[in-house]
Image (cartoon, rainbow, N blue to C red):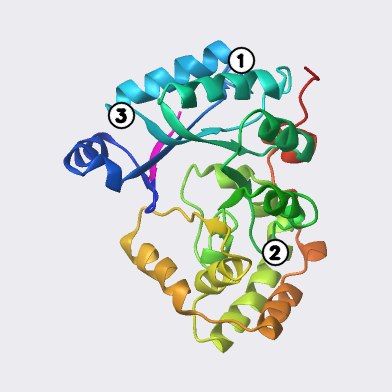
Amino acid sequence: MEEEIQIPRVKLGSQGLEALKQLPREKVQVATKFGIIRLEDGKYGVRGTPDYVRECCEASLKRLDINYIDLYYQHRIDLSVPIEDTIGELKKLVEEGKIKYIGLSEASVDTIRRAHAIHPITALQMEYSLWTREIEDEIIPLCRELGIGLVAYSPLGRGFFGGKAVVESLPTGSRLAMHPRFSGENLEKNKLLYARFATLAAKHACSPPQLALAWLLHQGDDIIPIPGTTNVTNLDNNIGSLAVKLTQEDLKEICDAMPISEVAGERNTAALSKYAWEVANTPSK
C-alpha cells in the first residue's frame, strides 16, 4: 500500500511520518489506497473483498498513527467481487469515522455508477495527460454528472513530457524501459511528437512539462493533476505551470501537436492492462 499526503502530494517515509505528527491534523489531507497485492509468483493481483478492505484500512491507520484517513481509494478494481460489496464496507468505515471520503481508480463507467449508488464517490483517479485522453468521451462526462472530482495521475506521461528517454536517458533499472511507449520503434516515433511539442512550449515561453500541465489545468477546475517528483527543481518547474495562460485556440493547437492517433504504444504494460478502466467491470450483486 502507498501512504501519501495530498496537497501537496508527498509520499510518506519515516521522516514524513514524523513530520505529519508535528502538524495540526485538520490542516493536512491524507490520502492512501488499497487493493493491489503481490502474489506468490511475484506478479500483481487485486483484492477488494470486504474483510481485506477493513484489514488494509486498519493497517494504514496504525502505520500512519492517525485516527482517520481523509480520502481512501480502491487502487484497482477487483473483477471477481461485486463493487457493491467493496463500497459497502467502505461505507461502514465512513460511518465509523475511520475514513471521510471514498475514491476509486481505473473504474469503468458501470462500476462508477454502481459504486456511487451505494455511497457517494468523491474522487476518481485516472491516467490523464496529453497522450492519454481516452477518458474524455465517457469518464469525464460521467464524473461531472455525478459530481465526482477527477484526479489525473501520470499527467506528464510518466515523465515523457519532462524529457524522459528523449532528452535524458532512463535511469538504470527503470521499469519504463519495458513500457510500450518507451521502447523500440514506439519510442522513436514518440520522440518526433516530443520535438514538435517542445517547439510549441518554446512559443509559449515555458518548458514542455509546464505546457503539458497547463493544458491539463485548463480542462476544468474539477480535474486535479498529481505530478510526482523527488527533485525540488522539477517541483518548482511544475508549479510554474500555474502561470501559463492558454486560450481556446492555444488548447486546440496543443492537441493538434499531440494527436492521439500518432502516439505509439499502449498506455499500460501487459500486467496492468487487464485492470484498465475499459474492462474494470465487476459481477452483478
Query: Which one is closest to the eye, mark 3 or mark 2?
Result: 3
Label 3 to label 2: alpha-carbon separation: 41 Å
Label 1 to label 2: alpha-carbon separation: 40 Å
Q: Are marks 1 and 2 in contact (CB under 8 Å)?
A: no
Q: Which residues are magenta?
A: 1-5
Amino acid type, callout 2:
Asn
In the foreground, 276 or 20: 20
Label 3 to label 1: alpha-carbon separation: 23 Å
Q: Which residue is mark 3?
A: 64
- Quarter of the image with the C terminus in it: top right
Q: Are marks 3 and 2 in contact (CB under 8 Å)?
A: no
Question: Mark 1 falls on what kind of element?
Answer: loop
Density class for disc 1 (Cα within 10 Å; few <14, some 14-19, many ≥20) is: some
Q: Would you identify the image quadrant in which residue 58 lies? A: top left
Q: Would you identify the image quadrant in which residue 83 lies? A: top right
Q: Could you tell which of marks 3 and 2 lies nearer the N-terminus?
A: 3
Q: Position of residue 10 (x, y in %)?
A: 36, 47
60 part of magenta stretch: no
Question: Mark 2 falls on what kind of element?
Answer: helix
Density class for disc 2 (Cα within 10 Å; few <14, some 14-19, many ≥20) is: many
Q: Which residue is mark 2?
A: 190
In the foreground, 201 or 191: 201
Q: Could you tell which of marks 3 and 1 lies nearer the N-terminus?
A: 1
Q: Main SS type for the magenta part?
A: strand
